[in-house]
Amino acid sequence: VKKELIKNTVTVLLTLAAVYVFFRYLWSLLLPFLIALGVAYLFNRPIKLINRRTRLSPKVLSGIFLLVTLALIAFIIFAAVNRMVTELGELISSLSANSDRYVSEFFAFIDSLATKIPFLSAVGGDLTEVVSEAVRSMLTSLSAYIPTLIANIISVLPKVLVFSVIIILASYYFCADFDRIKDNLLSLLPESFRDTLNRFKNRLRETGIS
């Protein structure tokens, strides 16, 4: 019993150490390949279906699928970022130009409540001036931060570009030869684990999920 306990403890510790090393040192390196493998898995079935019907090679179909998907993603990201920056700039400009009016309307609302809630009548003009100045200062700071935000986004673009290129190339390679790569990866796993995966996959297939 004692030997079994020691063995289980060592197994747990080694597993935890392996998980720590993976996420601490390997995760960022393997992430683009894991994403590419997921992309290949999603595209595998449509590529096979079109290949049977058109006789186009998997490499050609993989390239077409990736180009269309990348064009769509790039368009969505560009449109979303452009719209977000534009809307944010217009919002801050509008708030800056109308800050005094908004503050005045706020205190007019307070004054209207003061007739019903006596202690609110203590809110005076000095406080209005302080709040108005604070709002203007905050909006000025936000306006000044927009160029910094854009510069920060531009500064990370090279890393994003390298990351994206790795994903694209790996996705193309995985899509073009998915079955062989899958078999090679599965061959690295213990047989008991492969059997468990097969049973799980069969159950998903029976339920219509896979």
Image (cartoon, rainbow, N blue to C red):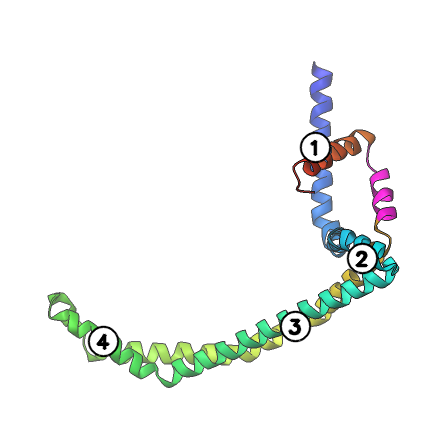
The foreground one among 31 and 42 is 42
Q: Is residue 159 visible?
A: no
Q: Nearer the viewer, mark 3 or mark 1?
A: 3
Q: Amino acid at mark 1?
A: Leu
Around disc 4, counting alpha carbons within 10 Å, would you say few (fewer than 14), some (14 to 19), or many (20 or more)? some
Tell me which label, 2 or 1, sits earlier in the chain: 1
Image coordinates of residue 184 in percent, x first then y, are 87, 43
Q: Nearer the viewer, mark 4 or mark 1?
A: 4
Name the secondary structure under disc 4: helix
Q: Is residue 182 above or below residue 160?
A: above
The residue that disc 3 covers is 75
The residue that disc 4 covers is 107
Around disc 2, counting alpha carbons within 10 Å, would you say few (fewer than 14), some (14 to 19), or many (20 or more)? some
Name the secondary structure under disc 1: helix
Q: Amino acid at mark 4?
A: Phe
The residue that disc 1 covers is 13
Instruction: Say left or right for 184 vs 132.
Output: right
